[in-house]
Amino acid sequence: MAIKTVKTESVFGGWQATDNFGGEGQFRRSIAIDPYMPESDSDKYPSGVIRPTAMAKFSASEITGVPLWIVTNPKNTNAYVYANDGKVHTIASDLTMGTALNSGTALTASSGNGAEYYDNYLYLAKNADVARYGPLNGTPSLTQDYWSNTLGLTSLTDTTYPSINGVEMPNHVMYRYTKDKLYITDVNDNKGILNYIKTTKTSVEGDTDDSSTYEALDFDYGVYPTAIEGYGTNLAIALIEGVDTTTKQKSAKLSFWDTTSASYNKITDVEFPDPLITALKNVNGRLYVFSGYASGGCRISVFAGGYSFSEVAWIPDIYPPLQGAVDHLLERVVMGSNTTVPEASASVFAIGSPDRRVPMGLHNILRANATGANPWVTALKYTQQDGNLDQPIVGYDDDTEKGLSKLSTTYGDYNVFQDTTYRFGREFKLRELRLPLSVAISTNTSFIVKFIDDTGATTLATINNTNNAGQRNIKLNPEATFYNKGYLQIEWTGTALCPISLPIEYEFEVLE
């Protein structure tokens, strides 16, 4: 027999790429664990430990459609949530629900097709029109047919796009470009196109049309735009070719346009591996591309220049995020999606850190309050300024409920951590396990410790105030026998915060 002592010293590396092998500081899986969060809810600096996070639902019966867009603006302190049932909800600066637009009635003929702030107004794409709400610096009103009636432009086309987890991808994504135009994706005569709205000031900012244009740019037949983002002096436009979600008809494409040429300047063709590009995000000058499959499988890539992409991560069991579910904190890229392992959840993932001195990999940092089957995060926006911790709004969807979540200090059955897999290729015993804690065990502090091998899960202990009152260092001597390989799983159950400090120490006995 041989005794082997190992330690988990760091978790900054994030999720490992495979079930059985990981790099330095990596671990198997997690849900709602963020090492960048402070060690307590009153601290300010990143903790670097296994730190659970919590969210609370702050929407009730108001949210009846899937949240697709969360839009902030510089004219007032409200955020506006546009859902796929056509309703536009208002969120006050304290993250409480306000009075919905249109007295809570859905916009006519709307599926939440696109939304953006531009020049003192909130613009809301509908199936075949664009509504606008404003001026936001005065007494705002809603115009339901601004595009077709006020501007007198050709109606948009309500083209059927692929659905992900039962939610159709928005077909009129909007993007406010720095050259003072609001671009809108569309399809005309089976060709993808870009339209734009351009306004100027007569009495108030944005009140007067200034040569808004239908079909400012077109693409090839059968090529539809799905996302749009600024990249230097260009627009980057994601394109799909084929809307079937079972057959990979063609690979997705990425095009670039300088906004003045008669046609796009460059387009990738065979280089991109996936049929869907669902979102784009410019993060500190780096263009992130989110792609994958409608049935699950998400790839995160960075455009490397020319016709090349550099893969950041491939997660085979989660959905690629919608355009309204990506955001960033400086260099930390954040996206909404889901998990199937360790369990189903509506989750927020992050790659990187806002501070370059803290290098971080892929982490599952938040869990929305979805409780039904097939949960996922469909909208995401950081809205509150805080020198300690910026506050996100998270929109979620499942088979029974749609809603909005915000950060909370009341914890519960939300968090799971799976450490890296230890491989022995034969029977082995876990003789000793040590878990240092950031807090002493007290009322409402509890978690379950399991070890999972090729035969299944074995519960080692339930740590709570009854069994471990006042303890800050948990020592377990399970003397349990396992087979071939295994990993530690911790499941939090208490309502009080209980981070696991590092290192976690194991003592294994490999059996001959």
Image (cartoon, rainbow, N blue to C red):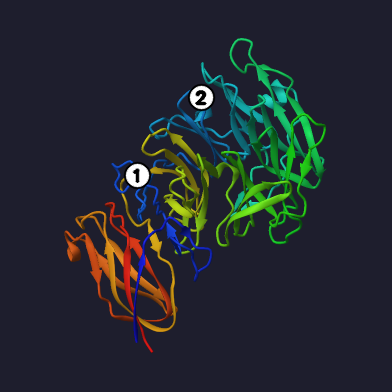
Disc 2 crowd rating (10 Å Cα; few below 14, some 14-19, many 20+) is few
Residue nearest the observer in this picture, 2 or 479: 2
Does any portion of residue 340 appear in the rendered image? yes
Residue 377 position, x and y percent, is 51, 49
Amino acid type, residue under disc 1 in the picture: Ser
Residue occupying the point 77% across, 51% down:
269
- In this rendering, would 88 be left or right of 384? right
Spot the residue most to the top.
Answer: 203
Left or right, 191 with respect to 322, comes to right
In the foreground, 312 or 54: 312
Q: Using the image as rendered, state which of residue 33 and residue 182 is in the foreground.
A: 33
Judged from the image, the secondary structure of the residue bearing numbered disc 1 is loop
Residue 74's label in the rendered image is 2
Quarter of the image where the N terminus is located: bottom left
As drawn, the label of residue 148 is none
* Quadrant in the picture for residue 225: top right
Return the residue found at the far bottom.
Answer: 512
